[in-house]
Amino acid sequence: MKPAVARISVIDADLTPLIDLAFLLIVFFVLVARMSGEQLPAIPLPQPNDVAATPAGAGRRLAVNVLAQGGSALLTFGGERFATDASGLDRLASAIAQRLRSDPQVPVDIRADRSLAYREVEPAIDAITAAAAQVGTRVTIRVCALQAEGGTP
């Protein structure tokens, strides 16, 4: 007897139609997404008019820094240092008033060191209020706290 020869059968799947279908689906979804975007009308989005609605870093502003230095507060404005005594606060109010005369609607930011108590930040608020009174305008004061170690908000 002759030994039985085992036949090897190969199962082969033709993936070409499946790849064609995948490309057709991709083309279909690209076209549908493109057409749906063209059907939407252009809508002008509203812009906030209130100065308090703008982020602290946006647009024109004045910044008064209240920094902790040796257990007390140090005020800076426009690169100049001001003491927290009466004469220093008067000089600060005059410097702010001079800037407010050119742009009375500009907001004033107080950037205070987080480690300071409110009583040490309050003189800066009083100086800004006095500057607004000198100019005869109302001013928006925004307060943000700075990290004690890095000095960033």
Image (tube, rainbow, N blue to C red):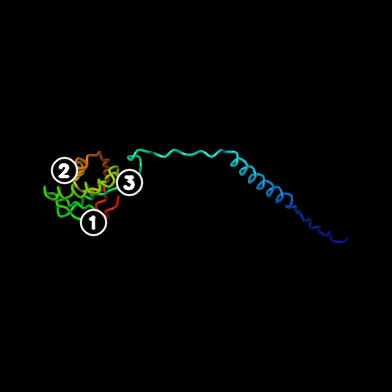
Relative horizontal placement of residue 20, taking residue 50 as reference (left or right) = right
Between 84 and 59, the one lying in front of the other is 59
Between 23 and 100, the one lying in front of the other is 100
Which amino acid type corresponds to the residue marked 2 in the rendered image? Arg
- The residue depicted at 67 percent of the width and 44 percent of the height is 28
On the image, the x and y values in percent for residue 89 come to 15, 48
Between 131 and 108, the one lying in front of the other is 131
Closer to the observer: label 1 or label 2?
Answer: 1
Distance of label 3 from label 2 (alpha carbons): 23 Å
Furthest residue toward left? 86
- The residue depicted at 69 percent of the width and 47 percent of the height is 24
Between 109 and 72, the one lying in front of the other is 109
Number of marks present in the image shown = 3
On the image, the x and y values in percent for residue 101 come to 25, 46
- The residue depicted at 60 percent of the width and 40 percent of the height is 36
Secondary structure beneath label 1: loop
| Cβ atoms at labels 3 and 1 below 8 Å apart | no
- Give the labeled residue for mark 3: 56
Q: Tell which circle, 1 or 2, labels the residue nearer the N-terminal end.
A: 1
Distance of label 1 from label 2 (alpha carbons): 23 Å
Crowd tier of the residue under label 2, counting other residues whose Cα lies within 10 Å: few below 14, some 14–19, many 20 or above: few
Relative horizontal placement of residue 46, taking residue 6 as reference (left or right) = left
On the image, the x and y values in percent for residue 67 come to 21, 52
- The residue depicted at 49 percent of the width and 39 percent of the height is 44
Secondary structure beneath label 3: loop
Secondary structure beneath label 2: helix
Closer to the observer: label 3 or label 1?
Answer: 1
- Give the labeled residue for mark 2: 119
Furthest residue toward bottom? 2
- Give the labeled residue for mark 1: 79
